[in-house]
Image: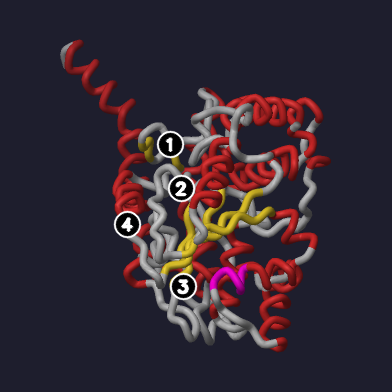
Amino acid sequence: MSNVELAALLAAAAALPGALFAAYALRFRRWYERGALGAAYFGRPSADRRAFEREVARRAAPLRRVVAAASRVAPPRRPANGVDWEGVTAPPLCTRAHFARAVGYRAGAADVFVATQMKCGTTWMQQIVYEVLSRGAGDLSDAGARHLYAVSPWIEAGFSVPLERAPRVGPSARRVVKTHMPAKLLPIAPEARYVYVTRHPVACFASCLDFVGMLLGPRMPDLPRFLDWFCSERMWWGPWPDHVDGWWRAAQAHPNVLFVHFEEMKRDLAATVDRVAEFLGEPLSPAEREAVVHKSGFDFMKAHEERFTMAPPTPLQVQEGAFLRSGRADRHGDVGPAARERVLAFCRARLRGAAYPAARFYPDLA
């Protein structure tokens, strides 16, 4: 055997583990996508979803070990992007095709959008809107729709029920559409309705830290890098100040955009339900109102948490985490003082000259 042949053989042997890993990863991805997209996951009975989650954990274990080892050698600098659309990034579950669909979609009178920056109360408001439209009779049990994302499409992502297949909800036959898109990218149709929710940026940061860490596992950046990412234009769907200011401007310009603060929802859920019902033109009887408030409460949603998880388990998810955590509005104590001040300083600087009156709602942003 010549030296050239020996070198080629050694190179092939060295590449073999990588080739095997790539082949296994591709096979896993094909299997995963068959069971994780749309109704294939969210339309399953809860026991079947749990079985799928266990199988994901089992099959993904070799991938997690390799990725964890690689991450120790080359730590991630920031959460990975799936798309960069006119400077707006989003996670890998979003693609350019998904963004193009969202940007190009022309909403109609049947569409009710729930819009937020991530981890600002999206799922909570989706449930409120779903129950208001259902007159308090919404059913996400195995005998009913089975999962919130089996009825509520996420327009710029690939996991939930597709928009065109989303069922119409309640007597008025409307759709509950989720989005994290900034207002500058989502056309505001006069016939549709848009409910936007925000929360204090430090609480948003704390919740993002928990959630992204749970999903990314070994690919989660360390705290300083994650903080840099959160306080930058590379933050998924745009930085908190820009996102909030854009939707505040939309709410001032369009009467069909309702702007809500998470802290209001925590302070008086019944008043929030009344406000949403009036905005949507969905009058509730006292009994219906009571049912909506009960089924939109933290205790009810926490007790039925598996009906509200945002996405199927990721291959890198190293352990099951609580999707609905404490339900507290004030999570400042969960963030160290240096990180808290960094987030506040970034938001103050970014909001100078903005339309959103941050100090009115969050005095520490003055």
Tag 4 near tag 3, CB within 8 Å: no
The amino acid pointed to by label 4 is Tyr
Element at label 1: strand
Check contact, mark 2 vs mark 1: CB within 8 A: yes
Residue 312 can be seen, yes or no: no
Which residue shows up at 74% across the image and 72% down it?
A: 270
For this rendering, which residue is in front, 275 or 41?
A: 275
**Disc ID at residue 88:** 1
Q: What residue type is labelled 3?
A: Val
Is there a contact, CB below 8 Å, between mark 1 and mark 4? no
Left or right placement of residue 32 versus residue 219 in this view = left
- Could you say which is closer to the camera, residue 52 or residue 258? 258
In the image: residue 140, left or right of residue 324: left
Q: Name the residue under label 2.
A: 181
- Identified by mark 2, the residue type is Met
153 to 21, vertically: above or below: below
User: In 3D space, how far apart are the residues under numbered discs 2 and 3 (Cα atoms)?
Assistant: 19 Å
The circle drawn on residue 105 is 4
Determine whether the residue tagged by mark 4 lies in a helix, strand or loop.
loop
Reply yes or no: does residue 97 show up in magenta. Answer: no
Residue 199 x, y percent position in the rendering: 68, 48
Q: Which residue is drawn at 50% across and 74% down?
A: 48
Q: Mark 3 — residue?
A: 151
| Residue 141 as seen in the image, left or right of residue 322 | left
Quarter of the image where the C terminus is located: top right
